[in-house]
Image (tube, helix red, strand yellow):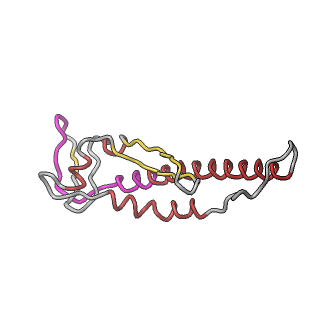
Amino acid sequence: MRLWTEGAVGSAGRIVRATVKAQVANIDRQVLSRGTRAVNAIRNAELEVLKGQRNGRVYRKYPYKTKYTASAPGEPPARRTGNLRMHWSGGVKTGRSSGSGIEVIAALESQEKYAYHLENGKGMAPRPFVERIKDKAMPEIEKIYKEPYQ
C-alpha cells in the first residue's frame, strides 16, 4: 500500500516522499554518530578499568631492577608493558534490518593475543576485565542512545 501517489514534479506525493527520505537519512546519520560515541565510551571505560595499582605478587622487571606488582586472581590485569591497554581497535559496523532501519554494532576488540588468556585464565587464575568494562560503559551508552533524535 502506498501512502502517496506519484505525480508531477512539485506534487504533494513527491514532496512527502522526499521529506520522509531526508528524515530517514538524517536519523541514520545520527545513529551512526551515536555508535561512534558508544565505542568511545567503551574505550574510556577500558582505560579506566585497566589502570591503577594491583595487589598481587611483586616481581622485578627484567633486565632492570625496578619492581612490578602483578594482579591478584580476580583482579583486572596489571599494567607491565602497557600493550594490553593500548592495543585496542574499535569501530561501528552497520547493516540494514528488515524494517528498513539501520542496524548498528559498536565493538571494541583487543589486538593482543594474550587478552583471551588473561580473561579466562589459561595457565593461571583468571584476571577478568571484559565484564567490568561493560558495566562501567553501560550507563554512558544508555544515555547516548536515549537522547532524542532531531
Q: Is residue 144 magenta?
A: no
Residue drawn where x is 49% and y is 54% of the image: 41
Q: Residue 86, image x and y in percent?
A: 37, 41
Residue 14 is situated, as x and y percent measured from the top left of the image, at 80, 48
Is residue 55 rendered magenta in the image? yes
Q: Residue at x 68, y 49 (%)?
A: 26
Residue 91 on image: x %, y %: 47, 44
Q: In this view, does 138 lie above or below 118?
A: below
Extreme residue in the left direction: 123
* Residues shaded magenta: 44-64
In-front residue for pair 33/2? 2
Q: Is 133 on the left-hand or right-hand side of 55?
A: right
User: Splitting the image into 4 quarters, where does residue 85 fall?
Assistant: top left
Asked where in the image residue 150 lies, by quadrant, the reply is bottom right
Q: In this view, does 149 lie to the left or right of 75?
A: right
Can you say which quadrant of the picture contains the N terminus?
bottom right
Kindly give the residue lying farthest to the top in the view shown.
63
Compared across the picture, whether 126 is left or right of 83 comes to left
Q: Which residue is drawn at 47% across and 51% down?
A: 105
**Residue 96 screen position, x and y as percent:** 53, 49
Establish if 127 lies above or below 25: below
